[in-house]
Amino acid sequence: MNTALDRPRCIDLDDLACRTQELPTLPAVVLELLQATGDATLNLDELAAKIRHDQVMTARVLRLANSSFYGMTGQISLVSEAITILGLRAVRSVALSARLMCAFPSQAHRHHVAFWRHTMGTALCARALAHRFDLDEDEAFTAGLLHDLGRLCLMSCFPGPYEAVMDYQQEHDCYPLHAERAVLGVDHQQAGEVLARCWHFSASMTHVMSKHHVVSTSELPVTMDLVALIHLADNVAHALGLSGDPDESVPPLDLHVWMATQITPQDAQALFVCVERELALLTDALAT
Amino acid sequence: MTEDTPSSATTGEPDSAGVSLNERQASISVPIAAPLSSVSQVASTIDPVVAHRFRHCLAQQQLHPLMPLVLQCRTQGAQS
């Protein structure tokens, strides 16, 4: 455990921006898939061509298509066939998740598995909720996948200090955001914003990465935009304990956002069951 | 201030006024007046893992609107 005396010095945003520049760039195929988010004209052949050129994506997509859930075990050998079975949206989700996971080394932090389970759970939840609020489902999934990348950025750029953050969180039983601010002086939302700008993410994704814990309530009633959606999806993912971390804690939910959702208990039950089932399938397909 | 009894707060059953917590969630926008220790105890009895997940909100005298929904889901899952 780190004490106040041996706690690392705070990081400023200039340090963070410099270190972020040193991170490996995302593979071109990830950027292409991110840029194609919400592109209604993306067709089966184009998506299959992008995925076919990437071994990791191809392997994970074929594994999912051949899982017993779809009843086609061992019969699917082409990405185009997998798209027919799974649908464009699911294939794109699996491919993007697989490649993003590879972009950050698993040994960078001790909660690697829990991090990605939470991230994918949030993405699936966001996608399920997007339809309800007439938002783009692909964009919602991608935003869920990216929302906490600021944490990975901090873990990768400052592995030692981030260990101290996790020790602090455990010692004080507090939210990660509070531990980051206490130990590093910056939090994963700020890191997310720096990373998003460095990697030239869209303005909407940058906004999600930098604001998902603090939804602006200057205008009431709250409009369910992408940030509000991810705020809610993040809460649901924590509430369901999707990360698998026994000490997971649910962050505060903006009650104006909650009121805007008007979710009934029946809706919630259906959402929970759907997200947990889809997460089981996705994590199985992505297991290394 | 919204008042919650432990039974309605955790089971979704109607309270003495015939209103369940689920129906009243939308009106909860301030810390609740019921003894949260009771809510916490009942939640822990139903599902200690779920209650543990909401420990920070309970410690801050806040009833998280997702807590009864998750508890209900877990209870129904256990029964089915």
Image: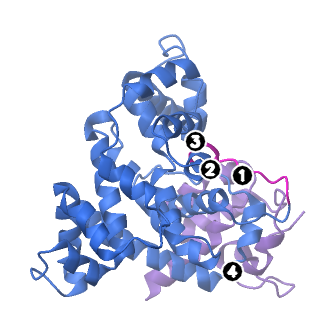
Chain colours: A blue, B purple
- Identify the chain of the residue marked 4, using the numbered disc in the image: B
Residue B66: percent from the left, percent from the top? 63, 67
The verdict on a common chain for dots 4 and 1 is: no
Residue A65: percent from the left, percent from the top? 22, 77
- Identify the chain of the residue marked 2, using the numbered disc in the image: A
Query: Does A43 sit left or right of A65 as displayed?
Result: right
* Residue pictured at 37% horizontal, 31% vertical: A156
Q: Which residue is mark 2?
A: A212
**Residue B70 sits in which quadrant?**
bottom right
Kindly state the secondary structure of the residue where label 4 is placed. loop
Kindly state the secondary structure of the residue where label 3 is placed. loop
From the image, give the main secondary structure of the stretch colored magenta: loop
Give the magenta-colored segment's residue range.
Answer: A209-219
The verdict on a common chain for dots 4 and 3 is: no
Mark with earlier residue (2, 3): 3
| Residue type, mark 1 in image | Val
| Residue type, mark 3 in image | Tyr
**Residue A45 sits in which quadrant?**
bottom left
Q: Are marks 4 and 3 in contact (CB under 8 Å)?
A: no
Q: Quadrant of the image for the C terminus of chain A?
A: bottom left
Q: Which residue is mark 1?
A: A215
Q: Which residue is mark 3?
A: A175
The verdict on a common chain for dots 4 and 2 is: no
Q: Are marks 2 and 1 in contact (CB under 8 Å)?
A: yes
What mark, if any, has residue B12 been given in the picture?
Answer: 4
Q: Which residue in the rendered view is the most extreme toward the right? A: B1
Kindly state the secondary structure of the residue where label 1 is placed. loop
